[in-house]
Image (cartoon, rainbow, N blue to C red):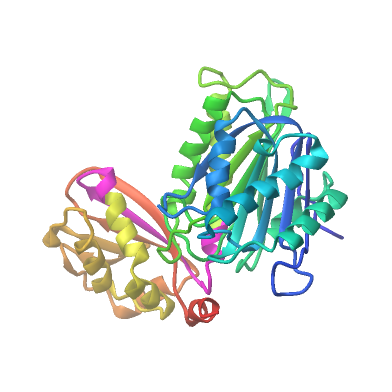
Amino acid sequence: MKEILPLPKGFSAAGVAAGIKKTKNKKDMALIVSEVTAETAAVFTTNQVKAAPVKWDIRVVEHDGARAIVMNSGNANACTGVQGMDDAEAMAALAAGPLGIKPIDVFVCSTGTIGKPLPMELIAGGIKSLFEHLSPDGGMDAAEAMMTTDLVSKTVTAEMDLDGLPVRITGLAKGSGMIEPNMATMLAFVLTDAAVDKHTLQCALRAAVDMSFNRITVDGDRSTNDSVICLANGLAGNELITKDSKHWALFCQTLEKMLFDLSMMIVKDGEGATRVITVSVAGAASNGEAEEAARSVANSMLNKTAWAGRRPNWGRIMDAIGYSYAQVQENKVDIDYGDVPAVRNGIAAGTPEGRLVDAVSKEAFTIHIDLNLGTGKAVVYTCNCTEEYVRINVE
């Protein structure tokens, strides 16, 4: 029996195979539609090179509300010049037509290979097919169509009770490679039937992204197409949520947990990954410096390959924090693998090698680093790097 992804009230979705991907009959286009205009919020890539759909969507989120999201995988429509912008707008127009709305009411997302023009004939046929398959039960098809090198689709649904009214939030995401904090390389769509003020929605989404998608890294690469888009159509009928609302905290907490769950699905599904590693830094001079140190360790290919080989080479961790922008005094650094001490005061803690190997052989483990310089702290989530990552990325 086909799995159903519960969508919030008033949302429908579809996913179809339009022929954009090389693999025959593999879904590569998705459509999400709200039956009424929804408030919008979004967070986009910080890469200076932005794909055409990102440039288009920045305009959409600044506009008053939206009705739909149309996306394709297999082609990023990035670095495609004027034609790329024309094609992004054409995608919006093709999706807007059957809904009787303007193109500016439609978000457009693309993911895949950079530098190739969109096959617009296939896109047009795909959008026509999407409308034919549009359904309140089409969420999983849309999630499947978002995938590129992902091995699994990534979805989460949460429900809240607001004064006796059921409110639902559903998230769909894709991401496996080219993942780096400061808008990790991925697409995510967040749908809710909650009534939320636009400014409040943007603040909540930004805060949730900072504690989720901006805390993960697979390979240190940041894409041209990263987008997290949220639509809130208000059909749950709740009292409008603002920053002064009694439900503000609950909404933010629910959204943050959802996005965190989605972000961890991305790390676990990292290209070729077999282990999930949490890098926790404490005792830094500031939170910002703690984050710099954590990212440096998490993005080090020397560390990632050591973790793949189950090698507790803590010298590589010392090296990585040392070349980060964080202040480090070597003789004050402590490092633990889980609850197993590896380093004390900058030198080997004397723990038997076998215990350290066992600690880094787990499918998931935490590296605790204490710089013992202040109160700054941060956490970054990452994975190991195996030969499979290379095989995936030589194509």
Q: Is residue 386 above or below residue 246?
A: below
Q: Residue furthest front?
A: 82
Residue 376 falls left or right of residue 194: left
* Rendering quarter of residue 26: bottom right
Q: Is residue 46 above or below residue 348?
A: above
Q: Is residue 100 above or below residue 223?
A: above
Whether the magenta-drawn stretch holds residue 287 is answered as yes
Position of residue 190 measured from the top left corner of the image (x, y, whole percent): 63, 42
Q: Which quadrant of the rendered structure holds the N terminus?
A: bottom right
- Measuring 47% from the left and 78% from the top, which residue is drawn there? 386
Position of residue 211 measured from the top left corner of the image (x, y, whole percent): 45, 44
- Residue 297 appears anywhere in the view: yes
Magenta stretch, residue numbers: 265-289
Residue 166 falls left or right of residue 226: right
Towards the viewer: 341 or 371: 371
Position of residue 28 measured from the top left corner of the image (x, y, whole percent): 71, 62
- Residue 15 appears anywhere in the view: no
Count of marks overlaid on the render: 0
- Measuring 60% from the left and 33% from the top, which residue is drawn there? 40
Towards the viewer: 267 or 136: 136
Position of residue 332 measured from the top left corner of the image (x, y, whole percent): 15, 58
Whether the magenta-drawn stretch holds residue 196 is answered as no
Q: Which quadrant of the rendered structure holds the C terminus?
A: bottom right
